[in-house]
Image (cartoon, rainbow, N blue to C red):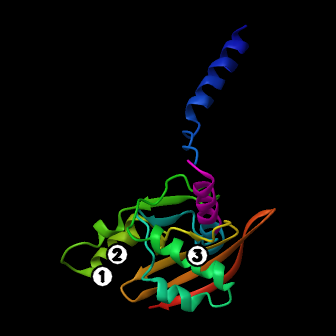
Amino acid sequence: MKLASILFAASLCAACMRAPAQPAPRSASDADELAVMALVVDSVLAQPDAPFLVMADSTSASHLGAEQLDNFVPTLDPAARAEIIADFAARNAVSVPTPSAIPATSVIRISNVSRIFAGEGDFNAKWEAFFTRFAPVRSYNTLSRAGFDAAHRTAVIATGTVCGGRCGQGRLIVLQKTDGGWHIARRVDTWVS
């Protein structure tokens, strides 16, 4: 009987220690966007030697407007390209909080990096403070909202990785959805510093 009480108490403690349930996506579009973000985090942004990655707390289109986006995805079907560009532009018209429910396998730490680097002062000292706070990670990342074609079979998402005042790169990721889920079809470098 004593063993049963101990096992019951242990199971209650284990249940209490589980991570809180993430809110369910509100729509199929939200689910697709979270799936695309997770794939990009795990396949593009995560570094195998780092225990986690730092994400900016708000989305960023990484300086990509409709004209630049059109230049980076010329191989897509023209009708789908127009839909994707319009959707990308609409979704990224304003920054929104980076979702905390991205279902990536990588560990993500969301940070208000704009607050870290805001204001006057020694920019190099701010980077050293960032490196100390997030050691051993030496960069932070941004994600845009995903732009989709009308059928939600093709998507594009912009990423940025910043590792110093003159260190970083941006990418545009083109994704395709098949019966097996989303996969990366193409990566295009959009800027480098």
Which residue in the protein does label 1 denote? Answer: 124
Residue 127 in which image quadrant: bottom left
Please name which of the two marks, 3 or 1, marks the residue nearer to the observer.
3
- Does the magenta segment cover residue 27? yes
Q: Residue at x 49, y 78 (%)?
A: 161
Residue that extends furthest to the front in the rendered view of this protein: 79
Mark 2–mark 3 distance (CA, rounded to whole Å): 39 Å
Residue that extends furthest to the top in the rendered view of this protein: 1
Of 88 and 193, which appears nearest the observer?
Answer: 88
Relative to 111, say whether 4 is above or below.
above
What span is colored magenta in the figure?
Answer: 26-39
Mark 1 and 2 residues: CB-CB less than 8 Å, in contact? yes
Label 2 neighbour load within 10 Å: few <14, some 14-19, many 20+ = some
Say which amino acid is labelled 1: Asn
Say which amino acid is labelled 2: Glu
Which residue in the protein does label 2 denote? Answer: 128
Assign the C terminus to one quadrant of the image.
bottom left
Mark 2 and 3 residues: CB-CB less than 8 Å, in contact? no
- Residue 91, label in figure: none
Mark 2 element type: helix
Label 1 neighbour load within 10 Å: few <14, some 14-19, many 20+ = few
Q: Residue at x 52, y 88 (%)?
A: 190
Please name which of the two marks, 2 or 3, marks the residue nearer to the observer.
3
